[in-house]
Image: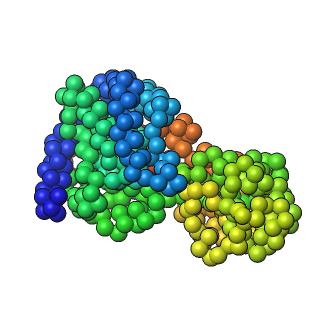
Amino acid sequence: METKNLETEVVENLKIVQTASRKLVRISDEEISAILNELADLTLDQKEIILRENKKDLDRMDSNDPKYDRLLLNTERLLGIANDLRKVASLPSPLHATLEQRTLPNGLSLSRVSVPLGIIGIVFESRPNVTFDVFALCLKAGNASVLKGSRDAHFSNVAIVELINTVLGKHELKGILYLAPSEREALTHILQADKYIDTIIPRGGKGLIDFVRANSKVPVIETGAGIVHTYFDKEGDVEKGKAIVQNAKARRVSVCNALDTLIIHLERLSDLPNLVASLGSDHQCEIYADESAFEKLKDSYPAKLLFAAKAKDFGTEFLSMKMSVKTVKTLDEAVDHIALHSSKHSEAIVSENQTTLDYFLKNVDAAVVYANTSTAFTDGAQFGLGAEIGISTQKLHARGPMGLKELTSYKWVVKGDGQVR
C-alpha cells in the first residue's frame, strides 16, 4: 500500500472512530456488560475460526522465538479470555463517580466526576489476546479503541476484530473499534494523530516503547518493558528465596514481570547453588553470572547453561529462559544496582529483617515493589482489578497495573444560581 494511500486510510478511519465514540456517552453500563458477555459466548462459538487464523500467524514464526508463546492461542487460552471478558463485564463501572464535592463561599457547587479518557490508541506486539483485553477494558470505561498490532499477529487480530464488530453491529456501535493496518508505516500515522486520539499506550519491548515515546504527538502512557530484579539479602530465608526465584523466572518467561537478574548478598553466596538448582535441572535456564557467582556455581550448575556475565547481561529484559546473577556486599549496593538497570516495573527483596525490608521498599523506585514474594503477581487480575491494559512504568496519570479506573479521567461540574465574577 502506498504511503499516501495508507495515511488517507488511517485518517479516514480515525474520523469514523471519533464520530462513533460520541455514542458511548449514551449507552448504559448494563448494555456494555451485555456486549462483553455476548462477545465471550461468540468467542467460544467461533473458536475454530480464531485458532485457524492464529495458526497462519504461528506458521510464519520460529517456534523457538520467545515471541511464539505470546502469539499462541489455544482452546485453554480462549476459555481464559472468555472468562476474563465476563469478569470485566461484572466489574462496577468506573464512570460517573463523584470523586470530590464541595460548595464555595460564593454558593457555587463543585463536583469532580470520573469520565472516559476518550479514544485510546494501543500499540502492541505479537499478543493477540491484547485485542480482547483492550477492547473490553476500554469499552467498560467508556472509551473507543484504536489498535495497532504487529504483522506477527495480523491474521489473529483481523479474526478477533471481526468477531467484536459482529457484536457491536447488533448494538449499533460499529466504529468504536479500529484495527489499523499491520504495516509498520501505519504506526507513524497513528502516532501523529493528535486530532483524533487522546492517549497512546504502547505494550511491548523497550524498542517499541522508545520509538513510540520519541515519535508520538499524542500523549503516551508507557507500559510493558520489565527489567526485573530480586535481591536475596544476607538475612533471606533460603526456602522462601528458592520458591520465589523459581516462580518469578520460570512461571512464564515471555511476560514483563518475569525475573531477569538475581542479586545476592556476598555473605549468602554459599546458598546460590540451592537457590537456582531447579532452574537448571527442571527448566534449563541459562545463567550469566558475575565472577563471584560463577565461581560458586561452576561445580554444581550445568556447565552448558552457565556463562560468565558481560556488562550487557545486566539491564537486559531477556523474555526467555535466561537470567543474570549479580553479587553485592551491601544492601545499598543492591539498591544502587537496581537504580542503574531497572525499568521501574517490578522489584523484589527476600529478607527476614524488617528494617532491611522497610529500607528496600522505601528506596527502590518502581511501579511495584515486593517483600518476600514473587514479581509474577504484577498483574491487573492478581491485584483484583479484573484485568489490565498494561503495567505503567511512569509516574504521570497512572502507575502499575492499569485497570478500569486508570482508563478514566475526570471533569469538574460547576452548578450555580446566577453567580458572576
Quarter of the image with the N terminus in it: bottom left
Q: Nearer the viewer, residue 348 or 124?
A: 124
Coloration mode? rainbow
Note whether 120 is above or below 162 in the view shown. Answer: below
Task: Look at the picture and state if 7 lies above or below 296.
Answer: above
Rendering coords of residue 135 (x, y %):
34, 39
Q: Is residue 183 left or right of residue 8?
A: right
Q: Is residue 399 left or right of residue 341?
A: left
Can you see residue 403?
no
Residue 13 location (% of width, % of height): 17, 48
Label tally: 0
Question: Toward the viewer: 175 or 55?
Answer: 55
Of residues 204 and 283, the one drawn nearer to the viewer in this rendering: 283
Identify which residue, 25 or 21, lies in the foreground.
21
Quarter of the image where one finds residue 33:
top left
Name the quadrant containing residue 364: bottom right
Q: Residue at x 59, y 47 (%)?
A: 252
Q: Is residue 25 left or right of residue 126?
A: left
Residue 355: percent from left, percent from top: 78, 58
Q: Tell me if 26 is positioned left or right of 141 in this view.
A: left
Tell me which residue sits at (35%, 53%) in the image: 150
**Can you say whether 219 is above or below 71 in the image?**
below
- Residue at (50, 55) in percent of width and height: 65
Q: In x, y percent, where is residue 247?
A: 68, 47
Q: Is residue 235 visible?
A: yes
Q: What residue lies at 61% left-to-right and 44% top-to-bottom?
A: 377
